[in-house]
Image (cartoon, coloured by chain):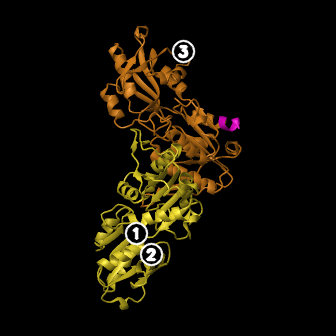
Chain colours: A orange, B yellow
Amino acid sequence: MEGSAHILNDAPLVLAMAGNERLASALAAALDGAVADCLIRRFPDGETFIRIDSPIEGRPLVLVCTLDHADDKLVPLLLAAATARDLGAASITLVAPYLGYMRQDVRFQPGEGVTSLYVGQLLSSAVDALVTIDPHLHRHDALGEVYSVPHVTASAAPAIGVWVRANVERPFLVGPDAESEQWVRAAAGGDLPYVIFTKTRSGDHDVAIDAPDLAQFAGRTPVLVDDVLSTGRTMIGAAEILMAAGFDAPICAAVHGVFSGDAADALAAAGLPHVVTCDTIAHPTNAIDTTSILVDAIRKLASDD
Amino acid sequence: MEGSAHILNDAPLVLAMAGNERLASALAAALDGAVADCLIRRFPDGETFIRIDSPIEGRPLVLVCTLDHADDKLVPLLLAAATARDLGAASITLVAPYLGYMRQDVRFQPGEGVTSLYVGQLLSSAVDALVTIDPHLHRHDALGEVYSVPHVTASAAPAIGVWVRANVERPFLVGPDAESEQWVRAAAGGDLPYVIFTKTRSGDHDVAIDAPDLAQFAGRTPVLVDDVLSTGRTMIGAAEILMAAGFDAPICAAVHGVFSGDAADALAAAGLPHVVTCDTIAHPTNAIDTTSILVDAIRKLASDD
């Protein structure tokens, strides 16, 4: 890959897509680069206009764009990448702390689009390398099945463990379903006790949650841990089990706080006011800074090369 | 091109992106095809879900999506095309009555993205052929400079001429600027009198309109004709000249009624209530049906092959 090779050899230009300005500044400072002077706006007819005012020819570009609500962000991102390419950027590395479009990862019913693959192809055509945090790998085993460009996937789950140890007395971690186990185990880091719930499906809409014996955790504070908090329904279901078993309302911790639809209201209504997320998607619940995790991942990408 | 060859040999499947259902039905009927049974919706997290329920393997697909407000439409369109490809469609022909992203066709200032080219490349990678009406070709001489796939560009300007002859007594056509001449001439069709205004720029914001001698048109009704009615400011400027010269408020006719921002209010405030557009973008001013123009263009695409 000619892309990432240049990232640390030359001072990178760091371009923030809308909403990613704080992270772009932090990355530029950490990588001895500069934030790109850039104007991205909409014409009155709704089309995107982009102008990159910083000298970019021959320089590596780090493009910063977290990809929640990806449908609103992909066109400006693709056009920014094309502009940078057109203007002669030496390489384009996409830093997407949250990588959207990872959940439709198989054709569940005939005729469905496997959109994770299509978005992966689109972005892999537009950039040279990718850095992200905890992509939702479920039926895909590795991000390389979806993205053909060199990439580094960092994990913020250990940082959730650090936060729990510093902020919760006598905690135990709870994975709300089998998929969550990889993140719960990483957060537990060998010393925090944890338990994983499993779901049993009986029909299209009936989902029962199987919880192991919880008596061993008596007197401890439960902390639900998952990669993505989307509608909140998975967390709420697991919290009901915990509260029915006599525990206090659990703290809900997630790497990515997507908060789809009425998620925030639903969590509050379920008696779950303590929600903690990493800052991969800007949200009032952000309590865990992932900048250093991303800096390490970008450095790893360059050294892997 | 293997794409368009199949369009009329086999009955095409016609897939309507949101808002294009009426045209898709009309095209399916005219081409002896069938409207695709298809579900395109958004997940609660804002990502697009798509499922094509009609058998598509080995069949040519006509994908119908007019591209005003293209930033909102391109991602679902690209994902629909990728799904159709993945499911084995024999070919994918995009019918975009209005083709957005044609105006940023050159780098006006250093650092600007030439987005017409980038969107052209994106769509040319996604589909096999393109049919559109009156693309805004200004600094690009031909659509082939922007789109690498086979394409047919039809013109609705003659249909504006037909509408004027049927609905306006003693008309004369007015092109509000030099760019509009190609469409005014096509609408005039050899028998309607017309005049073209020109703009003179003196500085960044001062634009003077030069109008030729209008005395020869005394007693006639002016009809302003342009390809795109976007903010309405070009039409309003020309209308002011006409009304200052003693003419009645002109009828404003455009192929594509984009109506950016406050365009509709601005036209009304300028005393221009008579606005007529083709139905390439759905709008209350639509008075000219382009279905037969598109059917002819699709047939031409297949016969060109």
Asked if labels 3 and 2 share a chain, the reply is no
Q: Which disc is residue B183 wearing? A: 2
What is the magenta range?
A: A300-305
Residue occupied by mark 1: B255
Residue matched to label 3 = A191
x then y, percent, for residue B188: 41, 80
| Along the line of sight, the residue nearer the viewer: A116 or A297 | A116
On what subunit does the disc labeled 2 rest? B
Which picture quadrant has residue A191?
A: top right
Q: Give A155 or B10, whichever is nearer the viewer.
A: B10
Q: Badge 1 sits on which subunit?
A: B
- Residue B285 seen: yes
**Of A125 and B163, the residue lying toward us:** B163
Amino acid type assigned to the residue bearing label 2 in the image: Trp
Callout 1 and callout 3 share a chain: no
Mark 2 to mark 1: distance in Å? 9 Å
Q: Are marks 2 and 1 in contact (CB under 8 Å)?
A: yes
Instruction: Please state which of the two labelled residues, at mark 1 or mark 3, is closer to the viewer.
Output: 1
Quadrant of the frame with the C terminus of chain A: top right
In the image: residue A261, left or right of residue B59: left
Q: Secondary structure at mark 2?
A: helix
Q: Is residue A303 magenta?
A: yes
Q: Residue furthest top?
A: A216
Q: Residue flagged by tag 3: what amino acid is it?
A: Asp
Q: Is residue A68 above or below residue A213?
A: below
**Position above or below: B130 against A237:** below
Between A141 and A290, the residue placed more toward the observer is A141
Find the distance from the CA under tag 1 to the CA under tag 3: 69 Å
Amino acid carrying label 1: it is Val
In the rendered structure, the answer to whether residue A7 lies left or right of residue A140 reads right
| Pointer 3 chain | A
Judged by depth in the image, the label closer to the viewer, 3 or 2, is 2
